[in-house]
Image: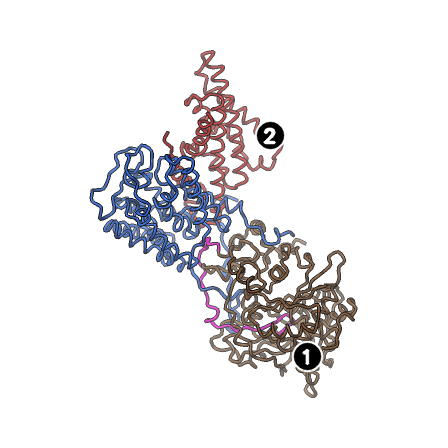
């Protein structure tokens, strides 16, 4: 409470509670984005989004050009997949996503001669010449159509197809779009670097998103621990009226939409699973997604690469790489110095919400914001001890739940009791597990409980 | 579901992938705080009160504390052995129980009573319920309540603190009316004697239980706990606020009949209970608002017993009563999720 | 007069709580305290029966039996009245709260043999209360029982997940908890 008062005095947007894990962004923060060109085959999964899996529209042994559409789905909630490199596709096979899920995929061998990607790809990706682009000149439906055509999905990790998120719904109008530049996960710096090196594209993309969904306000939200990005964004926004910069307090999970919206706008989003930001007339879009929206709508460039932060004490050369989808973790990590002896786990994403990968053959997909290779020093193993009802998890849950009660109920398989304690409202941010003195894996139990209930409901159908 | 069916918890959530990488669900960062550190903080916070008790009650203070430690630690150790559970003494919770129990006993309690109290505190108060984190009642208070019921007259024999001349003042009444503690002096029917000045109550040079007399020493410990964030302000605020408000109202209504609030703050174990006993993590409600209600209940009940009951001190009984109500408080004061209850 | 009634109420409900001071009514106290909603229902049922039975038995005893000199029929008439009151309650609950009726099972008709009810009726005679005092005493005693059983239900719901040693599970730990509660309630001694 006192902390929030102080934040308010400093002009920082904040929400009550929240935790302050060490942000450890110093490993990769200063590394500029560089292009990664894999030598090995890519393995491109057909499921890189929420929704129906894509079906291939190319055949085995077919040559494909860079950016050619190779898979699509006819279902409404889906986004097509494009060839990240020029080369030859192989026969359909299976791949394991970083989350552990097995999905259909297709291998792609990069072309031996010629350029796998267009010339000056990196310069063009980080281009800063967006003057003269007027987002209000675009038709909203045309924007959504181009977004879909270029395969843009939510790149903050959820991978929800963006054209559906931005589609106007007369019953639930949107008045504000927030660009989430907070990057509250420790270790990750990909959004930070993107804001520093290509801010104009991000702002144009944000304006296009606002135009598509009909929002009158567009807000760039950045955490206070990125003063250089705040400065750059403020300058860019000066030339583009209608967009504001909101500086947020540095805490986790500031970037979660159920915390960001109350912080920036003071509105409370109704609880999950039914409640969504659009119920309070807001859409939150990730930084990399807005960047891709600009490239897609204005320049017709499909989503084929993304910035991935490779970091952690388990790699010797951390960095921020522009990586084509389908790149194997093993090749990318090798390029950064390889997995060190002391490494204990490889996390796809950040340490608060990212899953550990079972092996290094998993590939980078649209939602992979980073690879954190953690050593024992960074992620010590703890023995779970009995709950002492200290209430720290209850006091720190940003959604005002009782994590220990839910986790306890899940442990004893009493899913009715877990539901009575609003298990389904949990956003799995991990604050509870972080603060627990008994080191009970609370968020893990809750997630397991939600999965169990989901499986049971699916089995019944 | 039959009464004897035990609910077994699910297994471990860690597994190892090929290539030696650990596969675990997120989050992978944790705060290094541990249960043991929380307990250690409480022990450190009790050091000033222990030093005060050494000054006032000398040998008795050491004797009772040592017996409590032996009784509590041995009982927990034996219980774990018999049940084939790992030794849990290292989490220091039995040490905390022993110290709190010792501080709440009269200095001249005979050795067999102290030992029995310590054993019952851990056995009945904690181990029968399943061990750390699963007991409903504060174990030290369970031990003390048992001693109160079993050895009523021994538990109400007090001594004057050291550096004051005179032998221990025995009780010669059937009811548990103590003869020399400040709280006993305000009970109707007691021989008229001038009440100690308020400052003396705060320093602690009065008769009373081992650790409860020196409010100043206890407040130093309490400040330490609050700074370290081991306890939060809710229960002390609720308990002291409600108790002092109750005392103030009674005092203003009938100044001749009831003592003033500052007296009640300094006398007896109100401060000890508010900061160190009622704040026991396991036996108080989970949510902040629940804890304020819990504290307020403790405060009101303490004052009701002090002002209208037969016993001079009500802290122990009120804490046990509120421990009993804590599950209901937790049930009826469930925090509402931000954004309303989850539907669908 | 009001102060005296308040004193009677508080004494019956808390200071001399029927469960924790006199150990009456242990049967439903152990049997129906598994869940809080059932406990609250049983508490109100017992309160209602106690009030009706207390008042009716007072009327019958003070106004009828003493007049015609048949005081020795006290026990039989009391039990008859209690049985009738329980029937009333049973019919009411069955009609309006059928699921509660199902979950009570045998414990609802067993209120007839609940020693707390008969105990309350006999206490009224022992203390020689008048009509209003009887009413207040019965309600107080019933609510005291309701408080005891609800507290126990809250605790038992918590204990469902506790690692209680095998020999103590179920009635064992319940009785031990009741013992601790009795010790706690013994703090409310009032000398008058």
Find chain A in the image and tell me its colour.
brown
Q: Where is residue A193 in the image (x, y as percent from the top left)?
A: 60, 76
Number of numbered discs visible in the structure rendering: 2
Closer mark to the observer between disc 1 and disc 2: 1
Residue farthest to the top, as pictured: C68
Picture residue at 49% right of the left edge, 19% below the top: C77
Q: Name the side, left or right, on which A285 lies relative to A448.
A: right
The residue wearing badge 2 is: C92
Region of the chain picked out in magenta, as a range: A364-391
Q: Where is residue A100 in the image (x, y as percent from the top left)?
A: 59, 67
Element at badge 1? loop
Camera sees residue A359: yes
Q: Position of residue C30 (x, y in %)?
A: 46, 37
Q: Position of residue B92 (x, y in %)?
A: 36, 57
Camera sees residue B118: no
Q: Name the side, left or right, on which A143 lies relative to C97.
A: right
Query: Which chain does the residue under circle 1 lie in?
Result: A
Picture residue at 49% right of the left edge, 54% below the top: B9
Chain identity for the colour red used in the image: C
A155 inside magenta stretch: no
């Amino acid at each position: 409470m006192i902390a929030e008062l102080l934040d308010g005095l400093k002009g920082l947007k904040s929400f009550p509670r929240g935790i302050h894990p060490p942000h450890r962004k110093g490993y990769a923060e200063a590394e500029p984005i560089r292009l990664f060109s894999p030598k090995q085959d890519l393995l491109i999964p057909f499921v890189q989004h929420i929704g129906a899996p894509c079906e291939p529209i190319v055949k085995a042994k077919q040559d494909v050009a860079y950016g050619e559409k190779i898979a699509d789905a006819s279902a409404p909630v889906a986004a097509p997949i494009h060839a990240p490199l020029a080369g030859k596709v192989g026969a359909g096979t299976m791949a394991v996503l970083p989350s552990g899920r097995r999905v259909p995929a297709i291998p792609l061998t990069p072309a031996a001669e010629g350029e796998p990607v267009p010339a000056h790809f990196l310069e063009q990706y980080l281009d800063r010449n967006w003057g003269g682009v007027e987002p209000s000149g675009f038709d909203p439906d045309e924007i959504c159509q181009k977004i879909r055509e270029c395969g843009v999905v939510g790149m903050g990790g959820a991978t929800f197809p963006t054209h559906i998120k931005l589609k106007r719904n007369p019953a639930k109008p949107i008045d504000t779009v927030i660009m989430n530049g907070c990057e509250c996960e420790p270790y990750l710096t990909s959004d930070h670097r993107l804001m520093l090196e290509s801010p104009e594209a991000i702002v144009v993309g944000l304006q296009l998103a606002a135009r598509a969904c009909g929002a009158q306000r567009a807000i760039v939200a950045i955490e206070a621990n990125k003063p250089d990005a705040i400065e750059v964004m403020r300058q860019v926004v000066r030339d583009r009226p209608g967009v504001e910069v909101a500086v947020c307090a540095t805490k986790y999970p500031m970037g979660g939409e159920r915390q960001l919206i109350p912080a920036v706008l003071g509105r409370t989003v109704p609880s999950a699973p039914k409640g969504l930001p659009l119920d309070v007339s807001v859409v939150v879009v990730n930084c990399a997604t807005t960047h891709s929206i600009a490239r897609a709508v204005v320049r017709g460039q499909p989503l084929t690469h993304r910035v991935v932060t490779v970091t952690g004490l388990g790699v010797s050369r951390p960095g921020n790489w522009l990586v084509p989808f389908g790149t194997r973790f093993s090749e990318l990590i090798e390029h950064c110095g390889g997995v060190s002896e002391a490494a204990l786990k490889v996390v796809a994403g950040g340490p608060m919400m990212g899953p550990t990968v079972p092996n290094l053959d998993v590939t980078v997909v649209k939602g992979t914001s980073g690879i954190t290779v953690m050593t024992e020093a960074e992620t010590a193993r703890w023995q779970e001890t009995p709950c002492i009802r200290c209430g720290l998890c209850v006091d720190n849950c940003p959604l005002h739940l009782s994590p220990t009660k839910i986790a306890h109920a899940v442990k004893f398989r009493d899913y009715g009791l877990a539901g009575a304690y609003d298990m389904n409202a949990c956003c799995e941010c991990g604050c509870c597990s972080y603060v627990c003195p008994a080191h009970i894996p609370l968020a893990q139990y809750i997630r397991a409980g939600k999965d169990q209930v989901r499986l049971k409901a699916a089995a019944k159908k | 579901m039959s009464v004897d069916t035990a609910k077994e918890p699910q297994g471990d959530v860690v597994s190892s992938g090929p290539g030696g990488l650990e596969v675990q669900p997120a989050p992978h960062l944790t705060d290094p705080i541990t249960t043991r550190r929380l307990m250690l903080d409480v022990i450190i916070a009790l050091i000033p009160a222990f030093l005060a008790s050494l000054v006032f009650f000398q040998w008795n203070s050491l004797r009772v504390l040592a017996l409590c430690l032996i009784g509590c630690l041995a009982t927990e150790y034996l219980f774990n052995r018999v049940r084939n559970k790992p030794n849990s003494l290292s989490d220091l919770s039995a040490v905390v129980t022993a110290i709190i129990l010792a501080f709440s006993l009269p200095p001249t309690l005979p050795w067999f009573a102290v030992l029995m109290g310590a054993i019952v505190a851990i056995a009945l108060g904690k181990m029968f319920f399943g061990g750390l984190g699963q007991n409903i009642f504060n174990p030290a208070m369970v031990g003390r309540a048992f001693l109160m019921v079993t050895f009523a007259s021994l538990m109400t024999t007090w001594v004057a603190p050291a550096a004051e001349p005179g032998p221990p003042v025995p009780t010669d009444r059937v009811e548990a009316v103590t003869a020399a503690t400040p709280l006993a002096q305000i009970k109707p029917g007691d021989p008229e004697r001038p009440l100690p000045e308020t400052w003396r109550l705060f320093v602690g040079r009065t008769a009373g239980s081992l650790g409860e007399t020196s409010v100043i020493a206890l407040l130093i410990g309490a400040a330490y706990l609050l700074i370290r964030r081991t306890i939060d302000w809710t229960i002390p605020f609720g308990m002291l606020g409600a108790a002092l408000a109750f005392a103030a109202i009674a005092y203003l209504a009938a100044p001749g009949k009831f003592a003033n609030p500052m007296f009640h703050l300094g006398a007896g174990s109100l401060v000890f209970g508010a900061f160190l006993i009622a704040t026991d993590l396991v036996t108080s409600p989970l949510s902040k608002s629940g804890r304020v209600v819990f504290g307020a209940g403790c405060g009101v009940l303490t004052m009701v017993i002090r002002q209208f009951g037969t016993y001079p001190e009500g802290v122990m009984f009120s804490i046990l009563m509120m421990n009993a109500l804590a599950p209901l408080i937790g049930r009826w004061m469930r925090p509402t999720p931000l954004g309303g209850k989850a539907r669908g | 007069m009001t102060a005296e009634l308040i004193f009677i109420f508080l004494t019956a409900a808390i200071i001399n709580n029927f469960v924790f001071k006199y150990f009456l009514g242990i049967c439903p106290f152990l049997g129906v305290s598994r869940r809080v909603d059932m406990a609250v229902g049983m508490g109100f049922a017992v309160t209602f029966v106690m009030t009706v039975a207390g008042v009716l038995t007072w009327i019958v005893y003070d106004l009828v039996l003493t007049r015609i000199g048949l005081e020795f029929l006290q026990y039989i008439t009391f039990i008859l009245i209690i049985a009738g009151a329980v029937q009333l309650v049973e019919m009411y609950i069955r009609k309006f709260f059928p699921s509660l009726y199902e979950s009570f099972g045998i414990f609802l008709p067993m209120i007839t043999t609940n020693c707390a009810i008969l105990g309350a009726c006999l206490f009224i005679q022992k203390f020689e209360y008048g009509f209003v005092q009887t009413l207040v005493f019965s309600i107080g005693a019933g609510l005291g029982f309701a408080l005891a059983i609800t507290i126990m239900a809250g605790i038992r719901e918590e204990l469902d997940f506790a690692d209680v040693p095998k020999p103590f599970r179920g009635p064992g730990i319940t009785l031990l908890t009741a013992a601790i509660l009795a010790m706690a309630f013994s703090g409310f001694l009032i000398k008058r």
